[in-house]
Amino acid sequence: MPESAWGWLIITYLFLAGAGAGAYISAVACDLLAPDWSRSLARAGSLASGPLVAIGTACLVLDLEAGLWEPWRQIYLVGNLSSMISWGVLVLSAFIPVAFLYAAALNEITFVGRIAKKYLFLLEIVGSVLAVATAGYTGVLIAVINGVPFWNTPLMPVLFMASAMSTGLAVAMIGAAIIDIRTIKTLSNFALGHVIFLAVEVLVLGLLIFMSLTRSVEAAASAMILISGPLSPYFWGLVVVMGILVPFVLSIVEYYEYGEMPKYLVVGADLLVLVGGMSLRALIIYSGQPPQIV
Amino acid sequence: MPRYGIAIDTTKCIGCHACRVACQNQNDLPVSEEFNRIVERERGVFPSFSKEFIPLQCNHCKDAPCERVCPTGATYTTAEGVVLVNPKTCVGCKYCIEACPYKMRTLDHARGIVVKCRLCIDMVREGGTPACVSTCPTQVRIFGDLDDPRSEISRFVAEHRAQPLRADLNTGPKIYYKRS
């Protein structure tokens, strides 16, 4: 397998930006739909989203070469609006401050938070749009590349969006358990979210693999690397079983047992979703194959 | 303004790698970086078979995917149709390396920028030919103006129905191949 020009830093960015954006949407959904009993989940999601996306963006910057040593070069990054990276820079520059402001507003941190609280609903609407753009952008970034046929499909942003929602919800749920362990019972309500997002994710992932097998020789080669090639133990083990199936079953049990499931299983299911989300990004980047040119 | 390209006759290539050496020397490249490489392919089935050497380099695409995805606009196309990288504005994000379907771009770790075949444009503007063209002992490569119907390259492409590699990718490559 030829080496990808992108490595762990970009993979970490793809994961963190998705999880951070998903956590933001989870927080907004909780605050708008059930502000009385999902308070700790909304707080955790809002507090996590800004830092996660900011760390992810730092990974992007660390992956630069000359742009890292001579940071003033980064000013050129918005120079070409036919490049997805230029759009990404604009989206991230807008989303990160909004996410921090939302965390301050929802948790009433300092005077900034008290002022921002007056515009909470506006922050929720604008921030949600930017969060969808951030999560979708991680998929579009690689979907527009015809140099890697496996990535070059509109299914990619949909898959990353579904994964962003489930990993974001997992981040918010883990955070809620950290903030207040007693809320672990109410977390059962959100297990339904995991069931829905993981179902969508497995459906889109299945479609991506099946369609890649017939789309082109190179896309098929990438899909084969994942399902039966050198990366297949990671694909089946980390993504499909640990990242999707196990948390899917646990979430169904959690939803029906309503608050009776052991704490470590509740948090464990969320951790598995995170492992699966990170592995999914890594495997998609590493299985990319260039077109056969000769 | 000319539209420069190269026609490559793989049936003449003996796989000596002189073009690669000339290119490395001309561009002062370390072993880990290459603008020019030769892929070997076996054709046919025993006993009717042969080995084909296919010299590869940047195709200087008309609609270059690398130029489209470059966020800083560091990748640009000159009036002669040569795709170049401005070393002053490249940040080294490597998006172009991922986007190039021909995988003909390489990272210069020392300078932190992406580098590629320049079609030896400085020598060409002074009336010369690219180093890979002039150094080839079997004259595999023909350099010239694709817009001039009387040029050697245009006549060669027309006569042998030479085709670019993977023209179906719609990037408008300007390196033509005669492969049989």
Image: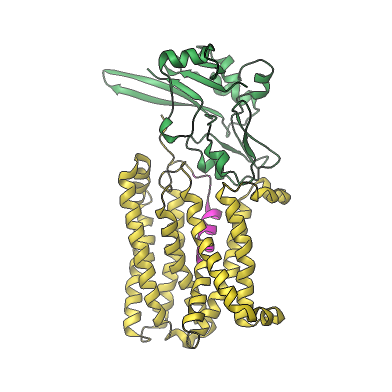
Chain colours: A yellow, B green
Residue located 53% across and 71% down the image: A24
Closest to the observer, A89 or A259: A89
Residue located 71% across and 40% down the image: B88
**Where residue A171 sits in the image (x, y, percent)?**
49, 72
Tell me: residue B149, above or below residue A292. above
Q: Is residue A47 visible?
A: no
Tally of numbered discs? 0
Q: Is residue A7 magenta?
A: yes
Residue B166 picture quarter: top left
Q: Quadrant of the C terminus of chain B?
A: top left
Q: Is residue B164 magenta?
A: no
Tell me: residue A218, above or below residue A24. above
**Where residue A40 sits in the image (x, y, percent)?**
52, 83
Closest to the observer, B39 or B171: B171
Which residue range is magenta in the image? A4-20
Report whether A112 appears left or right of B13.
right
Prevailing secondary structure of the magenta residues: helix
Tell me: residue A87, above or below residue A148. below
**Where residue A166 sits in the image (x, y, percent)?**
43, 68
Report whether A82 appears left or right of A174.
right
Residue located 57% across and 44% down the image: B94
Residue located 56% across and 36% down the image: B105
Tell me: residue A60, above or below residue B172. below
Residue A123 picture quarter: bottom right
Q: Is residue A46 visible?
A: yes
Q: Quadrant of the N terminus of chain B?
A: top right
